Amino acid sequence: MKYLFINSVAGFGSTGRIAAETCRELIAQGHSCVLAFGRKEALCPDVPTVRIGSAGDQLCHVLNNRLLDGMGFGSRQATRRFLSWVREYDPDVIWLHNVHGYYIHIGELFGYLRTCGKKILWTLHDCWSFTGHCAYFDDVGCDKWKTLCRNCPQKSSYPQTWLLDGSSRNYQKKKALFTGIPDLRLIVPSHWLEKRVKESFLGQYPVEVVYNRVNREIFKPTPGDFREKHGLEGKKILLGVASVWDARKGLADFCRLAELLDPSFRIVLIGLSQKQIQSLPGGILGLSRTDSVADLAQAYTAADVFVNPSTEETFGLTTLEARCCGTPAVVYRGTACQEIVERFGGIAVDRGAEHLYRGILELLKEDDHD
């Protein structure tokens, strides 16, 4: 069979790695696959790819969103060119992942999907598909997405807009575009997200929970020189990893945690911007993002505890990657990460640096007894 995957990135970040790995598995089974992406491609030279639009198209899409709150409603011409290619490729299955990210026009895309007669799978990695603006809403306690978004409390969060609040308009457009698509099945990575999808206008579709998987050939106990390279010999390493360290990822909680630790500990955070690195307090080593999964596996393996204080996660792939490398993990209760540690090992604690600290000590004590 011929598969077409559509995602904002290819081989890059958690969703890009998931999409690329699924392509590899299907190709190994004898299927044909192409991964269409809009923003960045990395670490997948073995996967056939096609780019949607250009950097210029993305810039225009970003500006449209900043001024008009129009995420998903830019890149019209780029999307039309892409759909012309899709008709020539003529896939049997179209597998959507993130359709946000300033690269594709959802009106053009779903107009095609409604009449194409193809089998359609859609893996949701966040909540953007059923809100009028945001990708997550639990932290602000908003449930307008259940009825009609309006007066969005997260205009300044991704996808950030400066002027208009288009949440009501976007919600109604998404509901019209995303519902009533023949032969569409939703896939979500956690029961946490499944519950929210079923309460949304996407609840009309069958929803399957499929936990994200990692490549166990890469993410496994991987000895290396991570400690020596960063001067961490003799330290208890508490590791955090994120693609983007925004507020929901828990950077502030790591800063508070650093105040509770004695000098035998060292927090290491991977994926920070240079500005964030420069603003870190003592006791925290900040590192920029790495595209090397081998280096990431070495970091996971070197750590004594993986700490994920993210407050809004639909899965938490980094937590599973750390567990596959043999590192115990502590996460917050009430997030999808709790599902990971309950199934694969680790502990979930109440929110707050003090609870993280006690959880870390508990894991280290358990490790001493092994």
Image: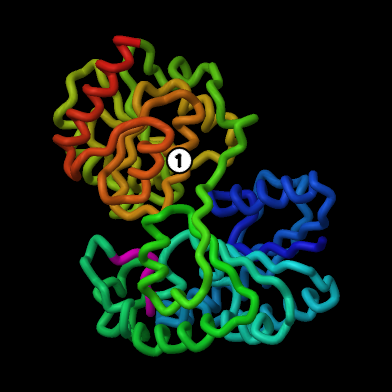
How far across and down, in percent of the image, does residue 269 sit?
37, 36
Seen in the image, is 8 located left or right of residue 332? Answer: right
Task: Determine the image quadrant of residue 309.
Answer: top left
Relative to 61, is 369 on the left or the right?
left
Q: Is residue 58 above or below residue 42?
A: below
Residue 327 is drawn in which quadrant? top left
Relative height, residue 320 to residue 72 (above, below): above
Q: Is residue 214 above or below residue 183?
A: above
Q: Secondary structure at mark 1?
A: helix
Percent x, y of residue 146: 32, 78
- Magenta span: predominant SS is loop
Quadrant containing the N terminus in the rendered view: bottom right
Magenta highlight range: 131-137
Residue drawn at point x = 75 percent, y = 62 percent: 3
Determine whether 346 is above or below 136 in the image.
above
The colour scheme used here is rainbow
Q: From the viewer's perspective, is 278 left or right of 212?
A: left
- Look at label 1 and name its amino acid: Thr
Percent across and percent down for residue 322 are 45, 32
Does 132 appear in magenta?
Answer: yes
Q: Which residue is mark 1?
A: 318
Question: Which residue is located at x 31 percent, y 18 percent?
Answer: 236
Q: Is residue 268 visible?
A: no
Q: Is residue 199 magenta?
A: no
**Residue 225 shows in this picture:** yes
